[in-house]
Amino acid sequence: MPVSSIPLYSSNLCISQNENLQHALELMLSNEVNHLCVCGEGKQFIGMLSTNAIIRAIIPASAQVEGGLSNLKFVGDAVRLLTGHLKKLTALKAGEFAKKDIAVLHEDSHILEAAKLLASTGSPLPVVGRDGTLIGVLSRRALLSYLLKQEQP
Amino acid sequence: MSNFAHSSSQIILDLSPVVVSLVVFVLTYFVIVTERINRAVVALLGAGLMIFTGVLHQTEAFAALDLNTIGLLTGMMVIVSLTQKCGVFQYVAVLAAKTVRADPWGLLVMLAVITAVFSALLDNVTTVLLIAPVALLITDALKLNAYPYLFTIIFSSNIGGAATLIGDPPNIMIASAAKLDFNDFLWNMAPIALLIFALLIIPLYLLWGRKLHAASEDRAQVMAFNEKEAITDPLLLKQALFVIALVMAGFVMAHHLGLEPATIAMFGAALLLLLRTFSLSSEEQSHFVHRAFGEVEWVTIFFFVGLFVVVAGIEKAGLLNMLSDGMLKLTGGDAKVMAMFILWVSAVASALVDNIPFVATMIPVIQDIAPSVGENNTAMLWWSLALGACLGGNGSIMGASANLVVAGFAERSGQPIRFLPFFFLAFPMMLATILVSTLYLWMRYM
């Protein structure tokens, strides 16, 4: 059974690569999703944004790099520092920040392959057509919900 | 270094020991410089080749190992690896930033001072490893370009390291070979290091000092940092400070006590381990000690082991003798010219290649020259070598391990330090420090 037979998250929930990250973040927050696909012209899939990646990017680099600061208690809440980083970040284009080297499913990919990929990656998977256009997004919940229904008599 | 007057090894294929040792030496140093293979592995392979080709007998190789250098490095590494966990470096850096009310120029000067002081008392790499991330965090909070601060940390660590016997590995090697003690270095190296450090502030101010500005809101944010929270283990802090004070006192009195620095450092390391593990079960103790020893930079230690043997090989073959004869001819046997030669050549060489192999090679050369120039002049040659090797490290981003550590941090945090821009600024500044050293040597010893 191909993944296209599963009800996917709408392909309408994607953003143009030229939109800024501020808009993308607002879209994720209003739709209560943690991931958002970034598309080029003709809905060509380009990459994926995630709230997790945004949070990681606003933490000071000095605390993230190998051998960096492990104890940040002395900094306090550092709201100004974090908001400063977020402001700088949200001015970027969605296409610049999107993660591009991610696993992608094709419309004819098998469900087992999709389950395996979902289990090994930390995010939902974009499903694309043969020409690379975004068809939809497969989430863990969508897959499990589909399988649960299959088991029911 | 050992005396190899009575050797009994057989050279492979009856080749000339000079040729064989030269080939092994050049090959070893060439591969070390290319950095294609881990330097410790290369040095140990070179050492093995010196033995297998018959240049050195293995008993001569064992005798060539300078246990004082190895013991001092290992002991201090254990002490520092335990001490750094208590957060004292972060505490001091934040306190320093708050002392100058997070003023950008004041911060730069304070970071320079604490880096120089820590580098003089501990090793350079550990110092920059702990200061650079805090500097990056504070400059981030102040919305400042981190480059001037990282540049300053590099220069300060190499200058501070030059000041004491334990500050920089070349000094440790020189002290051990020349039988110079902690106080000799304090008396001869610390004044010039202090002078150069003070003079360093001038170009730093001209380059960046006038342009550094931070918004008052950002400065207020840094002022809100709570340095006390940086201390993660107050008991460890007390124990470490106690042991470090004891070790420093031991270094100062080592000569009167008839003790080598390695003995003091090793004892200090053992004492700190005892204090840390006293209340633990035997299983926990074993685990803790195992982990503490695991944090010793074994690559550096084995690099030294290999180098000592490789240098012993060329020394026994007579290559270093030829080099020292050449130096005597080139300088006409004039100790003053020789001191200048050693100072400038070692500075330029240390800017471009690792200063440890260079110093390891130069030590037996100076020992060979010593009888020709007299005791007082020999001391001048040692100080020339120490100044050239330590300060030369500032000449390029590859000049010292500490430079590479800072560059690594800068790269990983998205603010890379490029080789050429750093070189064009740092190399002339390094030459200026060597010029000041030249005047110092001239006025004090000539």
Image (spheres, coloured by chain):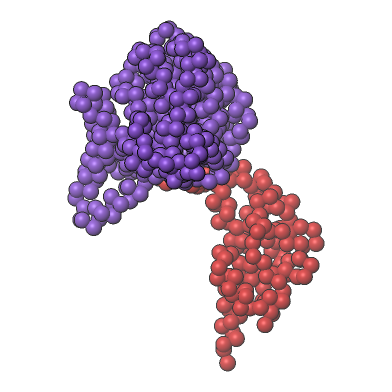
Comparing A98 with B339, the one in front is B339
**Residue B186 spot, x, y in % from top left:** 33, 20
Quadrant housing residue B34: top right
Horizontal side of A40 relative to B296 (left or right) equals right
Q: Colour of chain A?
A: red
Name which residue lies at 57% across and 89% down: A152
Name which residue lies at 59% across and 29% down: B422
Horizontal side of A121 relative to B94 (left or right) equals right
Q: Is residue A94 visible?
A: yes
Comparing B324 with B356, the one in front is B324
| Number of disc labels | 0
Name which residue lies at 25% across and 44% down: B273
* Vertical position of residue B362 compared to residue A60: above or below: above
**Residue B56 spot, x, y in % from top left:** 40, 39
Comparing A28 with B82, the one in front is B82
Horizontal side of B143 relative to B193 (left or right) equals right
Q: Where does the N terminus of chain A fall, quadrant-wise?
A: bottom right
Q: Where does the C terminus of chain A fall, quadrant-wise?
A: bottom right
Comparing B317 with B225, the one in front is B317
Q: Colour of chain B?
A: purple
**Residue B339 spot, x, y in % from top left:** 46, 15
Name which residue lies at 47% across and 39% down: B133
